[in-house]
Image (cartoon, rainbow, N blue to C red):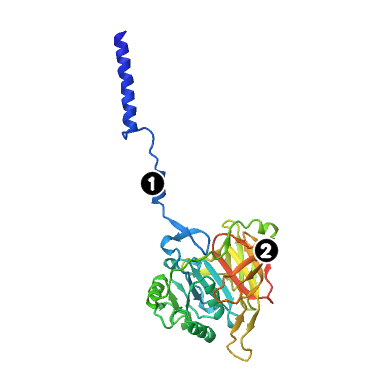
Amino acid sequence: MKRISAIFLTVVMLFVFAGCAGSEGGASSTPANTESEVTSSEPQLAVNPLTGERTLELDAVNKRPIAIMINNNRASLPQRGISQADILYEVPAEGGITRIMALFADINKIPDIGSLRSARYYYLALASSHNAIFCHFGGERDALNYIKNNNIKTINFISTAASYRDKNRVGKYAYEHTAFTDGERLKKAINYRKIETDATISSAFNFGDNSSAFSQGSVATNITVPFSSSTKATFTYDADSGMYLKGQFNAAQIDETTGKQIEVKNVFVLQTSISLKNANSSANYINVDLTSGFGYYACDGKIIPIKWEKGNDLDAKLKYYTTDGKELSVATGKTWVNIISSNNTVSYN
């Protein structure tokens, strides 16, 4: 009996010592908690102020966005790199054509992009709404005079070595359709020009849940935005991706780099007064009133009427409201902003 008791006691003591060893750092059958290790190895990202998504590298936080003027003449297509932009503005230029301004929150994410085109004052005003560094290939006289007289530091590709001519285009395209740039070239030019890049950048939109605003929205799986008799933008909703696919000239608008159709989450149409600067001039330069107006906001296959305002100050923020005056909630993601004449009718179904 004593022999059995001794054996039992020995076994118990072995279990006790084993348990103590495990609790003091020895081998344990309980898996270690590795959650902190996984979290620390994940990339740390900030919220992109142009899209509302947590995709911004930390070294791009509190850095001014980059706004690049892009050619949209039919003879210049396809464009390159614009599908990577966070926000795209499309506004009429002279002669019924449009130009596009591509905004990027992170200069390091700017791919090979173009072709590049010239400035207009209202594009400078839109870029200034985001405190963006404005990049352009020359420009209309009034815009260039305003930039010079107000000592605004921009990247003018004519006077700054920040672009190149695509050898594969030269000789096949008109020369004005052959200029391109990228983030590395722009960084060097900005440093050379000693342009200030640090700034506190506010959100481009009031990002949040927009379901309440769209509770009374109309179906908008197909949207047509008429800029002129020759230029119309189309947006076709893809329910599988939740994105709008951009088209123009009765075809898909393709990014040459990706070979894919450009897609965005949000579509805005801002209607305003657009008029000729000088009816007697053959240049047909126009004025675009960015003070305030009405328009539409489309997302997730629905559309609602809205109000918008910017005011007269060059750097005033462009703001969006519901028709009853509440600040508009906008879904996170890429956005395309169309600005058209109040005389033109937007169609959707």
Mark 1 packing: few (<14 Cα in 10 Å), some, or many (20+)? few
**Residue position for label 2:** 304
**Could you tell which of marks 2 and 1 lies nearer the N-terminus?**
1
Residue at (33, 24) in percent of width and height: 16
Residue 170: quadrant of the picture: bottom left
Query: What residue is rendered at 50% in x and 82% in y?
Result: 150
Depth check: give the residue in front, 153 or 174: 153
Measuring from the top left, give residue 5's x and y in whole percent: 32, 12
Residue in view at x 57 percent, y 70 percent: 317
- Measured along the vertical axis of the image, is residue 230 above or below residue 213? below
Q: Quadrant of residue 237?
A: bottom right
Kind of residue at badge 1? Glu
Q: Which residue is mark 1?
A: 37
- Residue at 64% in and 56% down: 211
Near mark 2 (Cα within 10 A), the count class, few <14, some 14-19 or many ≥20, is many
Whole-percent x and y of residue 75?
Answer: 53, 79
228 relative to 234, above or below: below
The quarter of the image holding the C terminus is bottom right
In the depicted view, which residue is nearer to us: 56 or 92?
Answer: 56
Amino acid carrying mark 2 in the image? Ile
SS class of the residue under badge 2? strand
Above-or-below relation of 145 to 41 = below
Q: Quadrant of the N terminus?
A: top left
Residue 328 placement, left or right of 88: right
Q: Residue furthest top?
A: 1
User: Is residue 296 rendered to the left or right of residue 194?
Assistant: right
Q: Disc 1 on helix, strand or loop?
A: helix
The extreme bottom residue here reads 280
The image shows residue 205 at horizontal and vertical percentages of 57, 64
